């Protein structure tokens, strides 16, 4: 119960802290955004100082009084130094590469600071995720693994950058709230049917170490399989040569939303996401056709894969009306 009340009090206090809404980056921490409070150890240190001061005054012990005042000065200085650890720190950008839902998303927080001041012990927190922010030469980044549960846009939330240096007596922290969301791809189907047959007459062939017909010989490259080496031509030319074969690649693959009508809404998305990844792995050209949307492609490569998975990720949530509209 006490922990729950403490968590609720902390949430209410954080709601009053700056910033109170998402903001555009870069942002710089100034004194109006930095908060400093004693840690648990700092509270114990203060209580110990009070006892020392009372005892020194009661017994008129000047050395004990001097020691207590020196420790109080050191504690007060630690508050200032903890504040200076964050003062002038600049959060430049927050970015992440899209991942399938259910896979941890690696959020990268880029920061810069004046190279003349040493900053140590900086930590970045988002929810339960936390990481160390190391600055070298005035620049650095922290990487946090955020859990993902569903496809679409993910709001990272408010970042908390904090430090307890130099003595651990006080915690200084500030918030940064990125306005840009990060994309989460749909979770691909774990197991399913192979790719649909290609359509059209634009069949192509690709070169690979194994296949049906020998296409040509080329110089040996490190990592080539031994069985692909053409020993007789290599002996004649006094250099290692490797056979490359021509493997039929097939026509462009059409990934059609309406062709998967018997499947449930999210199951269609999962299967199309799996087929997009499979087509990319096999080097095929494909076209993604979604209901009431222009076709994407045909094409292949990382950019085409991203465009297709992005379109699948941003499909509206499954509702009865959307089931009818999207077939």
Image: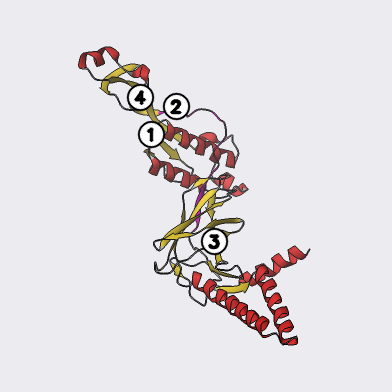
**Residue 186 in magenta?**
yes
Q: Nearer the viewer, mark 2 or mark 4?
A: 4
What's the CA distance linking mark 4 and mark 3? 46 Å
What's the CA distance linking mark 4 and mark 1? 26 Å
Direction from residue 10 to residue 135 in the image, left or right: left
Q: Is residue 322 visible?
A: yes
Precedes in sequence: disc 4 or disc 3: 3
Element assignment for label 4:
loop
Q: Nearer the viewer, mark 4 or mark 1?
A: 4
What's the CA distance linking mark 2 and mark 1? 12 Å
Pointer 4: what residue? Answer: 224
Precedes in sequence: disc 2 or disc 3: 3
Q: Which residues are magenta?
A: 181-198
Q: Residue at x 55, y 68 (%)?
A: 166
Q: Residues within 10 Å of mark 4 (few under 14, many from 20)?
A: few
- The quadrant the C terminus occupies is top right
Element assignment for label 1:
loop
Query: As drawn, which residue projects farthest toward the right?
Result: 1
Pointer 3: what residue? Answer: 123
What's the CA distance linking mark 2 and mark 3? 52 Å
Q: Residues within 10 Å of mark 2 (few under 14, many from 20)?
A: few
The quarter of the displayed image where residue 298 is located: top left
Pointer 1: what residue? Answer: 285
Query: As drawn, which residue projects farthest toward the top?
Result: 232
Element assignment for label 2:
loop
Pointer 2: what residue? Answer: 197
Q: Residues within 10 Å of mark 1 (few under 14, many from 20)?
A: many
């Amino acid at each position: 119960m006490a922990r729950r009340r403490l968590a609720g009090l902390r949430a209410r206090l954080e709601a009053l802290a700056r910033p109170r809404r998402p903001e555009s980056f870069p942002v710089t921490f100034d004194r109006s955004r930095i908060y400093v409070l004693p840690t648990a150890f700092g509270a114990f240190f203060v209580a110990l100082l009070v006892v020392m001061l009372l005892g020194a005054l009661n017994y008129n012990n000047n050395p004990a009084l001097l020691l207590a005042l020196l420790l109080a000065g050191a504690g007060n200085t630690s508050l200032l130094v903890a504040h200076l650890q964050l003062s002038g720190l600049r959060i430049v950008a927050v970015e992440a590469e899209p991942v399938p839902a259910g896979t941890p998303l690696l959020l990268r927080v880029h920061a810069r600071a004046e190279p003349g001041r040493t900053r140590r012990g900086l930590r970045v927190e988002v929810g339960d995720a936390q990481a160390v922010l190391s600055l070298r030469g005035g620049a650095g980044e922290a990487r946090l693994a955020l859990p993902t549960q569903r496809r679409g846009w993910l709001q990272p939330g408010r970042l908390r950058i904090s430090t307890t240096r130099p003595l651990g007596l006080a915690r200084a922290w500030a918030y940064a709230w990125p306005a840009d969301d990060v994309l989460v791809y749909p979770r691909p189907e774990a197991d399913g049917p192979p790719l649909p047959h290609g359509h059209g007459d634009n069949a192509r062939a690709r070169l690979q170490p194994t296949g049906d017909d020998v296409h040509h010989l080329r110089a040996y490259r490190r990592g080539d399989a031994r069985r692909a080496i053409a020993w007789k031509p290599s002996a004649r030319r006094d250099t290692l040569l490797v056979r490359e074969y021509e493997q039929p690649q097939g026509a462009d693959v059409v990934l059609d939303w309406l062709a998967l009508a018997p499947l449930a809404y999210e199951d269609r998305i999962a299967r199309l996401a799996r087929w997009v990844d499979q087509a990319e792995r096999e080097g095929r050209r494909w076209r993604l056709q979604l209901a009431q949307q222009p076709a994407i492609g045909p094409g292949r490569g990382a950019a085409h894969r991203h465009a297709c998975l992005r379109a699948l990720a941003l499909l509206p949530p499954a509702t009865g009306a959307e089931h009818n509209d999207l077939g």
